[in-house]
Amino acid sequence: MDEKYQFQQEIVKEKTYSFHISPEVFQCIKHINQDQVESCAFIEQQFNIHAQEDVYRKTKSSGENRIAIDLIVRHVNRELQKRGVKLRNELVHRFDFMCSLSMPETFYLVEQTAQIKYLHTIIRNKDTDRDEFIFYSKRLMRILIEYALSLLPFEDVIVETPQKLLYEGKKHVYTEICGVSIVRAGECLEPALIEVHKDAKIGKILIQTNQLTGEPELHFLRLPRDIANAYVLILDATIATGAAALMAIRVLLDHNVSEDKIALLSLLVSKQGVQTVAYAFPKVKIVTTACDTQLDQNTGFICPGLGNFGDRYFGTDLIGYSSDTDDVMTPIHGNFNFQPSTPDSPFSGQEILLNNCD
């Protein structure tokens, strides 16, 4: 052992300090004189007596230290406000730039036949009653799902017919297909998906618009455990600014879903919404039955549009309106309260954010 190190240890023993200085500390100070050694010993002693205990007290478990949690949360919010932008407001005011771009290659529009125009005429008409609105919307949804599934990759397969003959056909490359609906309007497309692909798994994402800030916020998520292996269809009735769609896609990417295995399905989209999604996620397919070119820069509504799809489909009236999602948050005594889309809603925005199901 180094002689100087032994000498320093003896100094500490003579001073009868009731603590032990680690060899690592002495390695850092072994070239300094005795007075400095004693000073360093005193500093470490005082740290162990006062600072270390204070650090432990201030970093107790979250349930016992709400003051520290509050400080951290406020600091994080302060930093986010410095760096962040108001996403929906920013998207609305980029309307002219987005509309000047050509439509992306990943945009797929159902052939605009007279029949498609006829169905849209009915659901866009403000005088259409709820029963007719639901009936003709479902017809469009079925067409949309069938068209979207035709865009998935296929591979050759040979089967034997009842006549003992061979038939050269096609089958989906991806055997697992998952639909993820953006609550609540996106839930309307779930029955159409199940009718077309009966083995499809269903996930849900609740993205609400904060009525005070106008920004989308993730409040509930329930996805199949093996979603990373599936081809995912995001279901939403309308896409206006694209803010909710961007968040939904980002959530799927965080769950290891490949970008090229995601398709965004909607009955009606705005041109700006398409450009926004395609610019951020160029590999995501966007499939729709109609595309409107105008977007109200004050409200973010699609023009001419079809109104609030969720209200017309479910027969409800909400306090606020979101062009991408129907649910809003209203402040009640300083806290946000979720207003469910239906009285029998299976979950609320106050539940755990991340839940997995088979």
Image (cartoon, rainbow, N blue to C red):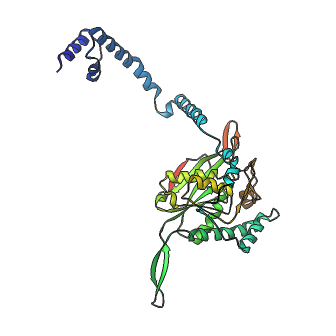
In the picture shown, does residue 115 fall above or below 297? Answer: below
In the picture shown, does residue 50 fall above or below 198? Answer: above
Most distant residue in the bottom direction: 163
Side of 53 where 143 appears, left or right: right
In the picture shown, does residue 42 fall above or below 210? Answer: above
Side of 332 where 79 appears, left or right: left
| Viewer-side residue, 3 vs 54 | 3
Most distant residue in the right direction: 127
The part of the image, by quadrant, that contains residue 109 is bottom right
- Residue at 61% x, 45% y: name it: 350
Residue 199 percent coordinates (x, y): 52, 69
Side of 306 where 45 appears, left or right: left
- Residue at 43% x, 24% y: name it: 55
Callout count: 0
Residue 200 percent coordinates (x, y): 54, 66
Residue 56 percent coordinates (x, y): 43, 26
Side of 48 where 317 appears, left or right: right
Residue 305 percent coordinates (x, y): 75, 59
Asked if residue 205 shows in the view, the reply is: no
- Residue at 57% x, 71% y: name it: 150
Asked if residue 266 shows in the view, the reply is: yes
Q: Quadrant of the N terminus?
A: top left
